[in-house]
Image (cartoon, rainbow, N blue to C red):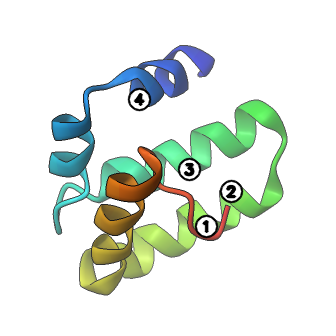
Amino acid sequence: MKGFVKWMDEAPLWLKIVFALPVLDLVWAVYRIIKGVAYGKISRIIAGILWIILGWFALWVIDIICICIFKEPKVLA
């Protein structure tokens, strides 16, 4: 699991932005869940579940903004 988290953290910026597009934002939801499980963070697991439910609808915009500013999705986790 930590290998996936490391790969996502080290991915190029353009790939992170592509993964934040509406349908592909599911990748960031899975990332949050896996990172939450790997590091024992309940808040990340909950954020990942919320992103699965609402991410395709509106939260993908927040992911793109956070990725451009912080280089990773940071909201709610």
User: Sequence order check: which comes first, mark 4 or mark 2?
Assistant: 4
Q: Are marks 1 and 2 in contact (CB under 8 Å)?
A: yes
Kindly indicate the quadrant of the structure image that contains residue 69: bottom left
Quadrant, the C terminus: bottom right
Mark 4: secondary structure: helix
Mark 2: which secondary structure?
Answer: helix
The alpha-carbon separation of the residues under discs 1 and 3 comes to 7 Å
Mark 3, residue position: 32
Say if mark 1 contacts mark 3, CB within 8 Å: yes
Q: Is residue 12 above or below residue 55?
A: above
User: Decide: marks 4, 1 in contact (CB < 8 A)?
Assistant: no
Disc 2 and disc 3: Cα gap in Å?
5 Å
Viewer-nearest of discs 3 and 4:
4
Query: Is 41 situated left or right of 23 in this image?
Result: right
Q: Which residue is mark 2?
A: 44
Question: Which residue type carries mark 4?
Answer: Met
Position in image of residue 34 (x %, y %) = 59, 39
> Which of the two labelled residues, at mark 2 and mark 3, occupies the earlier sequence position?
3
How far apart are the two marked residues, 4 and 1, measured between alpha carbons? 17 Å
Q: Amino acid at mark 2?
A: Arg
Q: Which residue is mark 1?
A: 47
- The answer to which quarter of the image holds residue 37 is top right
Q: Secondary structure at mark 1?
A: helix
Q: Residue at x 30, y 85 (%)?
A: 58
Position above or below: 72 against 69: above
